Image (cartoon, grey):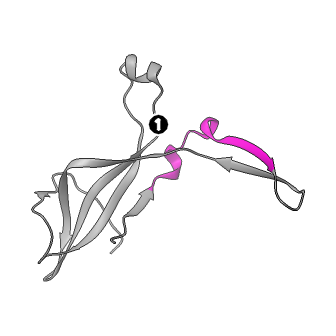
Amino acid sequence: MSKISIKIDLSKIDKTKITERKYTNKEGKEVVIREYALDIVPLKEKKLIKEGDTWAMVKTHFVAEPQTKEERANGQPSVILGDGIVFEDKGTSAPYKVQEEEINFPF
């Protein structure tokens, strides 16, 4: 099983969309959970970001805020918060499209 690494830009999060729910656990204590919903969407085509001799770092997904039916109907653009990246072994990976946009990684 492969791992997808997700990075999001926290400055883009709409803090008004953080929800809170409460429940009582088995010990009888009230627990408060603050949640923020995200959608992880696969790209139509993988995009190469960086490669070595035996591996490739590939953008495979993007992370966005979920849209309501009304937002989609009004044609509002999705709020993209980040990307999903995987490392693939060049010997077993499928072909992918070369990255067209510049992504700055700290390595």
- The residue identified by callout 1 is 66
Q: Nearer the viewer, residue 28 or 78?
A: 28
Task: Look at the image and tell me in which quarter the C terminus lies.
Answer: bottom left
Q: On the rendered structure, is 9 left or right of 91? A: right
**Where's residue 104, x and y in %?**
30, 62
x 29%, y 49%: residue: 42
Q: On the rendered structure, is 68 left or right of 103? A: right
**Where's residue 96, x and y in %?**
12, 59
Task: Look at the image and tell me in which quarter the N terminus lies.
Answer: bottom left
Q: Nearer the viewer, residue 75 or 88?
A: 88
Q: Decide: few, some or many residues near mark 1? Use Cα within 10 Å; few <14, some 14-19, many ≥20.
A: some
* Residue that extends furthest to the front in the rendered view of this protein: 26
Q: Amino acid at mark 1?
A: Pro
Residue 9 is inside the magenta segment: yes
Asked which quadrant contains residue 78, the reply is: top left
Q: On the rendered structure, is 19 left or right of 46? A: right
Asked which quadrant contains residue 83, the reply is: bottom left
* Residue that extends furthest to the bottom in the rendered view of this protein: 53
Residue 14 is inside the magenta segment: yes
**Where's residue 16, x and y in %?**
63, 35
Q: On the rendered structure, is 71 left or right of 98? A: right
Q: Secondary structure at mark 1?
A: loop
**Where's residue 70, x and y in %?**
46, 19
Residue stretch in magenta: 8-23
Asked which quadrant contains residue 77, the reply is: top left
